[in-house]
Image: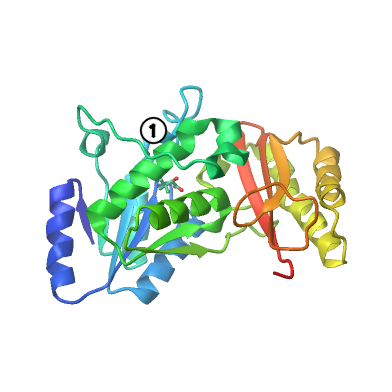
Amino acid sequence: MRILRTIAEVRAAITQERGAGKTVGLVPTMGAFHEGHLSLMRQARTHNDLVVVSLFVNPTQFAPNEDLSSYPRDEESDARQAVQEGVDILFAPAASEIYPDGFATSIHVSGLTDVLDGASRGAHHFDGVATVVTKLFGIVRPDVAYFGQKDAQQVLVVRRVVRDLDLDVRIEACPIVREPDGLAMSSRNVYLDAAAREQAAALNRALDAAQALHESGERAADRIVRAAREVLDDAGIAPEYLELRDAETLERVTTGDRDTLLAVAARVGAARLIDNHVLKGAR
Ligand code: PAF
């Protein structure tokens, strides 16, 4: 595996391989790898000739009050794991490589980013994501890019950017990878102490309870959401949001009779965690 720091190096390496007819899979990450990231790399490895993983803690998607400075970073361990997964190129640029002096462009996706994490974290968050992901697509020019379904809203935003800007890349959303007790894997789980770690498992239990009610035939959105809220209440978790929305448009729904996204965000101990389940409708 090659660790590359500059856009010019990545372009040179990939142009050579693409010229030989190879397909390119990209896994964009902010590092601190866990099984979720590794599952994306395995998908990319299975379906592409060349696998590129980007490792960049993107400053523009963090608000000033968020955890940019404390975000877990361990490039050495990440590189070791990437080698084990058969990654060809680890692109780990400095911030100045991605955002040189005078950088002035931002990509904003209207509508989709006004709700859930966009409302909770602020508009800058998805602007930062959309901009850096578009840059990565421009640098790597992947055939396929792999994202985790845990960040369901991010997947929808990236898909919309690709569609609206006619970017020639296929977006593959991969299933959420969970701990044995159901907690969705996240780089931010390292912030949880033992008590918070136990409490955090209630997020998925809450989504499970709502999903079970939906599967039993309940279609009223307020009852489905209430089933999840009761589990969170019992666990002493006050969510930032817990909402049932259309799984494609993120519009509010009153009934769960089409594909809907039940999404939650909550502070648990020192971590802000998100999770979701897609409730399958009859669409
Ligand atoms: O999901 C992430 O880790 C980040 O939001 C991404 C897609 C790598 C962009 O910085």
Residue 164 place in picture, x, y as percent? 40, 53
Q: Residues within 10 Å of mark 1 (few under 14, many from 20)?
A: some
* Viewport quadrant of the N terminus: bottom left
Residue located 36% across and 50% down the image: 77
Which residue is more in the foreground, 99 or 66?
99
Q: Amino acid at mark 1?
A: Thr
Residue 87 place in picture, x, y as percent? 31, 64
Which residue is more in the foreground, 83 or 148?
148
Q: Is residue 195 visible?
A: no
Q: Quadrant of residue 166?
A: bottom left
* Number of residue marks: 1
Residue 163 place in picture, x, y as percent? 41, 57
User: In the displayed structure, would residue 43 be above or below residue 205?
Assistant: below
46 left or right of 231 in image:
left
Per the image, the residue denoted by label 1 is: 60
Residue located 45% across and 35% down the image: 71
Q: Quadrant of residue 132?
A: top left
User: In the displayed structure, would residue 30 be above or below residue 122?
Assistant: below
